[in-house]
Image (spheres, rainbow, N blue to C red):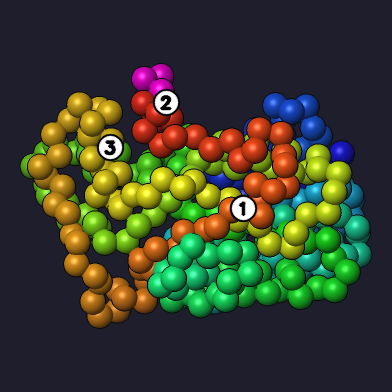
Amino acid sequence: MKVVVTGASGVLGSAVYNAFRNANIDVIGLAHSRSDGNLVRLDLTNKEEVEKFFNDRKPDWVIHCAAERRPDVAERDPEAAQTLNADVPGHLATLAKTLKFKLIYISTDYVFDGTSPPYTPYSATNPLQLYGKSKRDGELAVLGVDNAKCVVLRVPVLYGPAPKNSDSAINILLDVVQDQSGKTYKMDHYATRYPTNVVDIANFLVHLTELKKPIPPILHYSSDEPFTKYEICLTFAKILGLPHKHIIPDSEPPTGAAVTSRPRDCHLYTKETEDLGLEGGLGLSLFEEWWSQYLKK
């Protein structure tokens, strides 16, 4: 089996790439802005280069992790976000059809509006912001290619090993907790999130590619532990033994333009994924336990 992982320099992509390597599976990692000696540099928006690469390498599976994942950046450059989050996966789906590989498109819980959780794989999508809309359009592009073997895997906010804390919306809260300079931070205590570990997702994907039965076109993978960002900060402060008076909880619903950017609760229902019966089940880490062990290292 040969696997290609796009976005292999990112937090999720690097975990996925390493998981396949550790399983002794033939894997190629693709990156663009942060490629190194182990990764192949490829601009996924260059259709000719992409087609040549996939025709040459002939993978069995493609795990598409590359994306514009930052909502604020997507708002500033909607055309680039639409290209990377919708047009590129649509192109990969057409290649999946012609070259007979299986495509897994990593999507997001932000395709939902957060008003009526939990969301099943077939709940109606209603993204509130440009980032969520671009990822929803990517789902439609991937699933709209007839006779292509494609799977949409929706995940929530992610954490785990990262080159920089700023690479993850969860990891970066460590910097907030550790900033004891006297600066104060107003922290969201309104929206509920379900932070999920990238190593867990990566191991799940290895097992998924080994599955010998049909895979549903849409799957959800998510932790069930609810946190607001403020509660995550309290957890980090507890683990690190640091004061947290400089972090001020903000329990008010967002107003003005911010309303469109923060769904309140996009909890993903995962029973269909659990029912696949994969080895180890979902294999979800407990948030505080994982961070306690990781930070001790």
| Residue pointed to by mark 3 | 235
Residue 41 percent location from the top left of the image: 68, 48
Q: Is disc 2 surrounded by few (<14), some (14 to 19) or many (20+) residues within 10 Å? A: few
Under tag 3, what secondary structure? helix
Range of the magenta residues?
A: 293-297
Mark toward the viewer: 3 or 1: 1
Q: State which quadrant residue 120 falls in.
A: bottom right
Q: For mark 1, what is the residue?
A: 271
In this rendering, position of residue 97 left or right of residue 227: right
Q: Please, what is the dominant secondary structure of the magenta stretch?
A: helix
Sequence-wise, the earlier of marks 3 and 1 is 3
Image quadrant containing the C terminus = top left
| The stretch drawn in magenta includes residue 62 | no
Mark 3–mark 1 Cα distance, whole angstroms, equals: 28 Å
Tell me the distance, in whole angstroms, between the alpha carbons under discs 2 and 1: 29 Å
Under mark 3, the amino acid is Thr
Task: Residue 251: tell me if it is visible.
Answer: yes
- Cβ atoms at labels 3 and 1 below 8 Å apart: no
Q: What's the residue type where badge 1 is placed?
A: Lys
Disc 3 crowd rating (10 Å Cα; few below 14, some 14-19, many 20+) is some
Mark 3, mark 2: which one is toward the viewer?
A: 3
Q: Which mark is residue 107?
A: none
Q: Which residue is mark 2?
A: 294
In this rendered view, identify the residue nearer to me: 274 or 34.
Answer: 274
Residue at the spot 35% in from the left edge and 66% down from the top edge? 264
> Looking at the image, is 149 positioned above or below residue 177?
below
x%, y% of residue 296? Answer: 36, 20
Looking at the image, is 127 positioned above or below residue 169?
Answer: below
